[in-house]
Image (tube, helix red, strand yellow):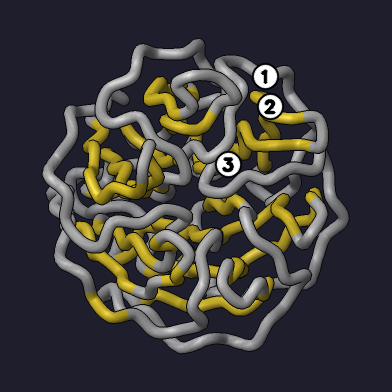
Amino acid sequence: MFPILSGNVASATAVSGNSEGIFAFGYNSTSLVYFAVSNLVSDVGVVGSDVAAVGTARRQAGACEYGEDKGIMAYGNKGAIVSMSNLVSNAGVVSSDVAGVGTARNISSGAASYGTDKGIFAYGTSSGGYVSMSNLVTNLGVIGSDVTGVGTARDGSGACEYGDDKAIFAYGYISATPPYVSMSNLVSNVGVIGDDVAGVGTARYATSACRYGGDKGIFAYGGVVGGNTAVSNLVSNVGVIGSDVAAVGATRHNQAATQYGKDKGIFAFGDISAAITLPSNLVSNTGVVASDVTAVGSKRGYPGACSFN
């Protein structure tokens, strides 16, 4: 009999991964309101009602897992960019603000876990423009100092896990023509970001990603020239991004995504032009995106999301 392994490691007897998820923070671009509320996702993918706000209301905070069953949300914009963080317990409780480490910046969906119990935040926009620096998160939820950037500086990238203990960042926005890119950067199981890999799929920004199937990932949605998209791209267990999969669900950007039910995923919230939309879309353990489900909670884009428990 094979042992059951913890963290992101799959075993012969059980599918690893966390059972529940959380979306928190965000911004309504119509009412210009910043949020600190959170919404829990059950182990069957049901998004719950708003939970009272904890921490500084802001948008574009990144989020990832750490310590195998907990999460962390960090950085963002409260009207000015910040570097504070908030830990998420293995019961989905968001803690008070923790003093920031590293360069203040917008992160959006640019965070993922690696090495089974640690995390990484990377890329974004600082007061000086687009950056490629990263910050590692220990298995105790402590954020480290800036690590010199690797790859093209950009904002609006998504990130997720793949292959049990590694991560990938992909897509984004750069201050050039064309403005949107599709390149990716792999993260090793010790948190080292690799050089740019030629892009696959529709170039876009404000996309998001999550793990599914135990050792694979999916990117979906995002902004494109002239509007939004709902295409998705699957990531293999060796970090290879596949071609576009036909769009499912409302086209949007500034949504977020997380794992739930150990081997499935969910995309929720986001922007449709100037309006705010609330659909969620479940992802099966084979990477199939389902039709829109009416979600619950404050209407907003730019939330952070991660799994726990």
Q: Name the residue under label 2.
A: 131
Q: Which amino acid does label 1 sit on?
A: Gly
Tag 3's secondary structure?
strand
Label 2 close to label 3 by CB (< 8 Å): no
> Can residue 102 be seen?
yes
The CA span between labels 2 and 3 is: 22 Å
- Nearest the viewer among 126 and 141 is 126
Residue 282 against residue 92 in the figure, above or below: above
Q: Is residue 67 left or right of residue 202?
A: right
First in sequence: mark 2 vs mark 3: 3
Q: Which amino acid does label 2 sit on?
A: Val
> Can residue 5 be seen?
no
The spot of residue 114 in percent (x, y) is 50, 36
Q: Residues within 10 Å of mark 1 (few under 14, many from 20)?
A: some
Tag 2's secondary structure?
strand
Q: Residue 130 has which mark?
A: none
Q: In this view, does 150 lie to the left or right of 288?
A: right
Name the residue located 62 percent from the left edge and 39 percent from the top edge.
121
Name the residue located 33 percent from the left edge and 47 percent from the top edge.
211
Q: Residue 149 has which mark?
A: 1
Q: Mark 3 points at which residue?
A: 118
Q: Residue furthest right?
A: 99
Label 1 close to label 2 by CB (< 8 Å): yes
Residue 273 against residue 28 in the figure, above or below: above
The spot of residue 186 in percent (x, y) is 44, 22
The CA span between labels 1 and 3 is: 19 Å
Q: Is residue 167 left or right of residue 9?
A: right
Name the residue located 41 percent from the left edge and 47 percent from the top edge.
208
Q: How crowded is mark 2: few (under 14 residues within 10 Å), some or many (20 or more)?
A: many
The spot of residue 49 in percent (x, y) is 46, 88
- Nearest the viewer among 80 and 225 is 225
Q: Residue furthest front?
A: 226
